[in-house]
Image: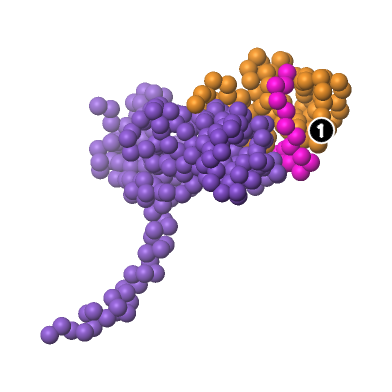
């Protein structure tokens, strides 16, 4: 059992706190290109995700787990389609709680 | 010789509303620690919570989180390193973003086998299982695996972990009332997050048996401040009422009892008070 690579729950605003660290977030896909996806975070900030060169069909919401490169971009290691019916507001509140008073349950 | 009414089953239970008050009492005492330790339900946790309690505890009686001995847990995460080479057993690792844990699933019937077929590496699943420590390592013996279809379940699981944790911290005497409030507003779809949960009324209803809480503590805390202890003539009760935003009539009774207990004393007149410094 190993807790060596926990990923922090972030939204657009929290991303800057974890630059260089492993993070996870859900974005609403706005557009995609070869090797990168542009999306809107759960708190309406723009995030660019650089990932593997093959981009499989994407649903509206995409969870990205990877390393935060800057305050608005992530280098993805894995991404998972989160479907079209996802509640970004709930996820946003979760990010705030998980980075705030309940951080010790997660990281 | 024996009075038959003594042994009649009906009369044994009909006396004094015994049955009716019991269930509501049991419900209310869910905050008592005795009941918590017998809790045997399915607890939503993160892998980090499991590893933490294992490291701090190492009790023979089993893993304990927040004073609750855990056996059955519920987790949500990504499947990794699935190894289905053995016929009767499937092993994999669950990565839920807070850590990784080894899982084992015994496959005895075709139902189990079918369930495990649909689980691949990289699939998000909901696991229910039994925590077991073996040779120093904690493992999860899984009895139920379900791939997740609606990903709101992922958000829900983590919120549930937070909720369960804060509920149990609260019942152990910590003042987490405001935290539970904020979690409850999250449940309502995040639209009420700007509502500041009123702290004082929640706390006053929880700590009645404790004697020195709420009002007494608030007054004492206020009077203990260096700005107040420095003032020779003491603090007027009106000022205390203003600062703490509590009506004066509520304060009067409490101040009298604090005075009687020797914690505060009156100074230049009967309306000025200072904290007794030892």
Q: Residue at x 86, y 20 (%)?
A: A34
Instruction: Give percent across and percent down for residue A39.
Output: 80, 28
How many other residues sit within 10 Å of disc 1, few (<14), some (14-19) or many (≥20)? some
Instruction: Give percent across and percent down for residue B197.
Output: 56, 43
Chain letter for orange?
Answer: A
Q: Residue at x 81, y 33 (%)?
A: A58
Q: Residue at x 32, y 74 (%)?
A: B13
Q: To which residue does mark 1 refer?
A: A58
User: Which of B122/B111 is in front?
Assistant: B111
User: Which of B259/B89 is in front?
Assistant: B89
User: Which of B162/B211 is in front?
Assistant: B162
- The quarter of the displayed image where residue A96 is located: top right
Main secondary-structure element of the magenta-colored stretch: strand
The colour chain B appears in is purple
| Residue A54 in sight | yes
Q: What stretch of residues is rendered in magenta?
A: A75-89
User: Which of B37/B120 is in front?
Assistant: B120
Quadrant containing the N terminus of chain B is bottom left
Q: Residue extending furthest front?
A: B87
């Amino acid at each position: 059992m190993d807790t060596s690579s926990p990923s922090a729950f972030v939204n657009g605003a929290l991303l800057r706190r974890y630059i260089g660290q492993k993070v996870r977030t859900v974005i609403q896909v706005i557009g995609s290109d070869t090797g990168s996806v542009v999306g809107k975070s759960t708190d309406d900030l723009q995030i660019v995700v650089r990932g593997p060169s093959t981009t499989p069909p994407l649903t509206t919401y995409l969870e990205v787990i990877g390393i935060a490169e800057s305050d608005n971009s992530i280098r993805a290691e894995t991404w998972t389609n989160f479907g079209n019916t996802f509640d970004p507001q709930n996820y946003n509140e979760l990010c705030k709680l998980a980075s705030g008073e309940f951080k010790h349950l997660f990281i | 010789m024996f009075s038959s009414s003594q042994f009649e089953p009906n009369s044994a239970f009909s006396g004094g509303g015994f049955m009716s008050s019991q269930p509501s009492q049991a419900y209310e005492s869910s905050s008592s620690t005795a009941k918590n330790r017998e809790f045997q339900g399915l607890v939503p946790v993160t892998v980090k919570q499991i590893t933490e309690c294992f490291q701090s505890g190492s009790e023979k009686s089993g893993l304990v989180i927040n004073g609750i001995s855990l056996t059955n847990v519920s987790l949500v995460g990504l499947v990794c390193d699935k190894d289905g080479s053995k016929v009767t057993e499937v092993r994999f690792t669950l990565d839920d973003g807070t850590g990784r844990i080894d899982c084992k699933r015994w496959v005895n019937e075709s139902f189990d086998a079918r369930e495990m077929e649909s689980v691949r590496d990289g699939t998000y699943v909901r696991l229910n299982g039994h925590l077991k420590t073996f040779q120093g390592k904690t493992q999860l013996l899984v009895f139920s695996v379900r791939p997740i279809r609606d990903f709101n379940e992922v958000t829900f699981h983590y919120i549930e972990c937070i909720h369960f944790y804060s509920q149990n911290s609260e019942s152990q005497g910590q003042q987490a009332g405001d935290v539970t409030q904020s979690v409850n507003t999250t449940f309502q779809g995040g639209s009420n997050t700007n509502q500041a949960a009123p702290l004082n009324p929640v706390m006053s209803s929880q700590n009645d048996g404790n004697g020195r809480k709420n009002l007494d503590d608030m007054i004492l805390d206020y009077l203990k401040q260096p700005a107040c202890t420095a003032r020779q003539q003491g603090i007027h009760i009106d000022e205390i009422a203003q600062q703490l935003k509590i009506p004066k009539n509520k304060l009067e009774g409490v101040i009298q009892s604090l005075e009687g207990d020797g914690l505060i004393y009156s100074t230049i007149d009967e309306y000025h008070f200072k904290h007794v410094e030892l």
